[in-house]
Image (cartoon, rainbow, N blue to C red):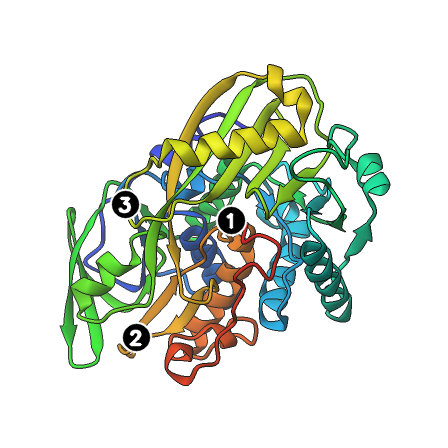
Amino acid sequence: MAVPEHPDFLWDNPEPKRSYDVVIVGGGGHGLATAHYLAKNHGITDVAVVEKGWLAGGNMARNTTVIRSNYLWDESAGIYEHSLKLWEGLEEDLDYPILFSQRGVLNLAHTLQDVRDSVRRVEANRLNGIDAQWLTPDEVAKVCPIVNVSQEIRYPVLGATYQPRGGIAKHDYVAWGFARKAAAAGVDLLQDCAVTGFTTSGDRVTGVRTSRGDIAAGRVVLCAAGHTSVLTDMLGFRVPVQSHPLQALVSELLEPVHPTVVMSNAVHVYVSQAHKGELVMGAGVDSYNGYGQRGAFHIIERQMAAAVELFPVFARAHLLRSWGGIVDVTPDASPIVGRTPYSNLYLNCGWGTGGFKATPGVGWCLAHTVAHDEPHPFNAPFTLDRFVTGALVDEHGAAAVAH
């Protein structure tokens, strides 16, 4: 199926109705997926998705497309594996090409402690029914011949975990597919519609104030990656998230040279090659808090130095463009998905660098939570009150990298 660069429906921008059953704040991947599954799984179509810019113009436009489910802890493995299974049938579900490519994901180990942690994660994945393998350096070279597996370099490759079902998808096509299905079901997609405040009555949010007028709401869902605390401040409660810049870049278009996805926790660089030919490279989050969609140069500089050492062939590639997204990070590096102090307000945030790969899974689970006012089993561990009870799901480094 041919995909237009700018699908016609994206230019539709209906006038908001005075009220909706459900108002979703944030027209990125998670908000659009939630709208789709509300309609498909629960028959709820009196829904508005409000977006201050254009659909999928925030983090969904600034991610590096990596998809995997090989997380350490049972709770994380559950929701990410659920999401990966949805990815595997998403093109048929949306009737739209998303260029999902299961080319496999390698997580490199550079120290003996990396090896111990990685083998532990492989065994934990297998116990959860997730495809996972431990590869020796020679086996790494067979999967990805351009990786430098010499033991004489600064970051010698001592082995790697491998998830064959992992891979990449084209992020804008994913967003367009969800938006197209949601719009066809009757969901209103309201662009250039910034949220300026909320109206409340007791423990309920009664409406959303926007730059295009006030909208009464039966239920409200917050899916605004990177800006969640700005919205919750308007509502008078705090969430344990910090916003950080997250940088990435792409090279000029190249012939196919990189057959898989390679990630390294020690040097915090991850690399794949897009369908058009660009090398897609990402770094770790900048350490300071901020909402700027650019980051510190030294982060990219270190990332590129490590990438060139691990992939000597990249030394001849040229930078095409770089960018920064804004990610919410929680104290345990796991998301918050579920109910809030307001009885009809639902929260989805704190995915850090894991948001894209969770897109269909969190949309499915959040739609269930909104429809039934009870968490789906896969998002039940990620409630806001875990920071009071201490039932944390600490994925700091446990999943090799949080990407």
**What residue does disc 3 label?**
291
Mark toward the start of the polypeptide (3 vs 2): 3
Q: Residue at x 32, y 53 (%)?
A: 243
Q: Residue at x 33, y 67 (%)?
A: 240
Between label 3 and label 2, give the one nearer the viewer. Answer: 3
Between label 1 and label 3, give the one nearer the viewer. Answer: 3
Q: How far is disc 1 from disc 3 in space, using C-alphas?
A: 19 Å
In the drawing, what numbered circle is on residue 344? Answer: 2
Eyeballing the image, is 10 above or below 321? Answer: below
In the image: residue 316, left or right of residue 56: right
**What residue does disc 1 label?**
356
Amino acid type of the residue that numbered disc 1 sits on in the rendered structure? Phe
Q: How far is disc 1 from disc 2 in space, using C-alphas?
A: 26 Å
Mark toward the start of the polypeptide (1 vs 3): 3
What is the residue that sits farthest to the bottom in this orientation?
389
Secondary structure at badge 2 equals: loop
